[in-house]
Each structure stands twice: as structure tokens, then as C-alpha cells.
Amino acid sequence: MNMEKNTGPAGEGPVNPALRRPFDGHENWFEQVYTHANEDVNKVPWARRSNTPLLLSWLEGQRLRGSRTLVVGCGLGDDAEALAEHGLEVTAFDVSPSAIAWCRQRFHSSTVDYQVADLFQLPAAFERGFDLVFEALTIQSMPPSMHADAMAAIAACVAPGGTLLIICFGRQPDEPTDGPPWPLTREELERFRHLGLQEVRFEEHMEGGARLFLAEYSRAAL
Ligand SMILES: C[S@@+](CC[C@H](N)C(=O)[O-])C[C@H]1O[C@@H](n2cnc3c(N)ncnc32)[C@H](O)[C@@H]1O
């Protein structure tokens, strides 16, 4: 995979020298991107391309005040902050200690509980622990061989009666993928239904020539 060409896990150009390293799906790759950004948000491509507007328009139709909310792979924290401003009780985690330190610095009076954590080794308390789980662009930033385990770990955090909201780059099954990123097909997202969730909503949006999927699922109440 050639990181010199115009790619990164969110699909943008290599404005940060760490983006030129071959991507291996390993957590240290992300840590290097954050440290080499030298506190310049413009050098973190996925932070430049915020999903927050799509998230905010979804939130407008919801009655979620006070809900325990988890943000997966929160990056620089913009989506976590948007959810907290909506009145939600937000925990946000990322595998990169530098990203989490940066979130705490950017939003020093935030109510968000920022934590360093690996999606594949989450604290036991996260299991079925959240009324809303939100994930944007993290599954697709991993090689396809990791997608099933990532989806299982995310689904496991949804409490009975809870909601999972996913925003990701999408592709048709016949469209090739040579990531990063590795956009998901709708069929791949179907896996959440086999993980005990029901699909509530599926939307396809176009943003700057890229296909974005918004998918909402729920877990039956006890
Ligand atoms: C493409 S970025 C998206 C960040 C953020 N969700 C956004 O939309 O701006 C992917 C994020 O997932 C994080 N990540 C990658 N692997 C992870 C893992 N195993 N556990 C937790 N976070 C992970 C990276 O550090 C990075 O911040």
C-alpha cells in the first residue's frame, strides 16, 4: 500500500509525515500521526473532515438526554463534545494516548470522560454498559480482516434497549477497496444483526464525492 499517494485512513492527503508510513492497522500507526501533528488539527486528516453535521442532524430527531453514551475511537473529540453538548453523559475512548491527551487539552472544561482504551481489550464495565454507542470512521480505518472483531466489540457495549449509531465510508460490493480506508458495504454492516441488534435506519449520503453510510441499530430491552 502506497501512503505517498493521496490516501489516509479517512481518505485524505498526506499532510503529516506519519501518514506516509505503510499502514498496518496497528495502534502505533495512529499514535504516530497524532504525535507528528504537533497539535495542529489540520495535520490529522479525519479531524479536518468532521462527521459532526451528520451526527447533529441525527441527534435532532432523538430524545436521549442523560443517556450513558460511548464514543469509539474518538480521535480529537469533536463528536464526543457534540454529544455532550446535547446533554448526554459521554465516555469517549481512543487507543492513542496522544489523541486522548489532546482531547483533554482542547476541551479542558469538558464533561466528557476521555479514556485511553483499546477496542479489543475494553474494560469489563463497558459490556452492555451504554444507552448510545457512536462510532465514526474507526472500523473502516482497520484492514478488513479486523472488521468482524471490531464490530463484535462495538456491539457488545450496547445496553438492552440501547442504540448503536455508525457513520462510515460506504461502497458497493463490486467496488474495489485498496485502503486505507476500507469502506464498508451494506452487506458487511448486516453483521450487526447477527450480533443481536436490529437495524432501525440506514441512510446513504454523498460528501465530496465519497459515499457515507449512516446506520442505526437497537438492542431489544430486557
Ligand atoms: C480514522 S480515525 C477516526 C477518528 C474519529 N472517530 C473521527 O471521526 O474523527 C480512527 C480512530 O480510531 C482509533 N483507533 C484505531 N484502532 C483503535 C483501537 N483498537 N481501539 C481504539 N481506538 C482505535 C485511532 O487512534 C483513530 O483515532
Image (tube, rainbow, N blue to C red):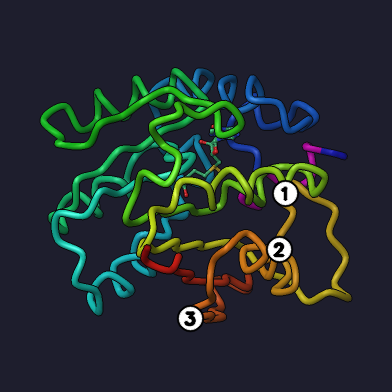
Q: Amino acid at mark 1?
A: His
| Badge number at residue 184 | 2
Q: Toward which corner of the image does residue 174 lie, by quadrant?
A: bottom right
Mark 3 lies on a secondary structure that is strand
- Residue contact at pointers 3 and 2, CB within 8 angstroms: no
Q: Amino acid at mark 2?
A: Leu
The mark total stands at: 3
Q: Quadrant of the C terminus?
A: bottom left
Vertical side of 133 occupied by 173: above or below: below
| Badge number at residue 56 | none
Q: Main secondary structure of the magenta part?
A: loop
Mark 1 lies on a secondary structure that is helix
Residue where numbered disc 1 is placed: 147
Residue where numbered disc 3 is placed: 201
Which residue range is magenta in the image? 3-12
Mark 2 lies on a secondary structure that is loop
Q: Residue furthest front?
A: 222
Q: Nearer the viewer, mark 3 or mark 2?
A: 3
Residue 12 in view here:
no
Residue 195 on image: x %, y %: 62, 59
